[in-house]
Image: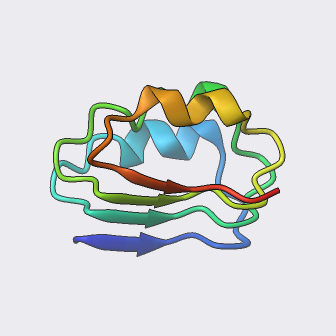
Amino acid sequence: LESLDLSWSSATNSHLKHIGTMSHLKQLDLYACRDVTSAGMKHLQSMPELIKLNISYCHNVSADARKLFPASVKVHSLS
């Protein structure tokens, strides 16, 4: 699996812990996942293949969460 779209879902930080183990995932869309928080982003920061992450309208994810990811990961965040 290289791309996962969880937009508008009830995904939580617990789900992100499992997603963080998906070593081949390149794109993750968490658009408007209201139960995802900045703490959950830590589970995703070591994904070796991740190149695109959408956290737009994830109101519980701070702007500082972008800093967890290397420059090679394009993080989209609008609130």
- 60 vs 11, nearest the viewer: 60
Q: Is residue 75 above or below residue 16?
A: below
- Answer with left or right where residue 60 lies relative to residue 74: right
Query: Of 11 and 26, which appears nearest the observer?
Result: 26
Instruction: Tell me which residue sits at (69%, 61%) in the image.
Output: 56
Q: Using the rendered image of the protein, determine whether residue 64 is visible from the camera's viewpoint.
A: yes
Among the 4 quarters of the image, the one containing residue 62? top right
- Residue at image x 83%, y 47%? 59
> Residue 52's x, y, as percent?
38, 61
How many marks are shown on the rendered structure? Answer: 0
Q: Could you tell me if residue 41 is visible in this image?
A: no
Q: Is residue 20 left or right of residue 38?
A: left
| Relative vertical location of residue 6 with respect to residue 24 in this rendering, above or below | below
Name the side, left or right, on which 42 lies relative to 72. Answer: right
- Where is residue 32 shown, x and y percent of the image? 76, 64
The spot of residue 61 in percent (x, y) is: 72, 38
Q: Residue at x 69, y 44 (%)?
A: 36
Which quarter of the figure is the C terminus placed in? bottom right
Q: Residue drawn at (65%, 55%), measured in percent from left and top?
A: 77
Q: Position of residue 10 (x, y in %)?
A: 73, 60
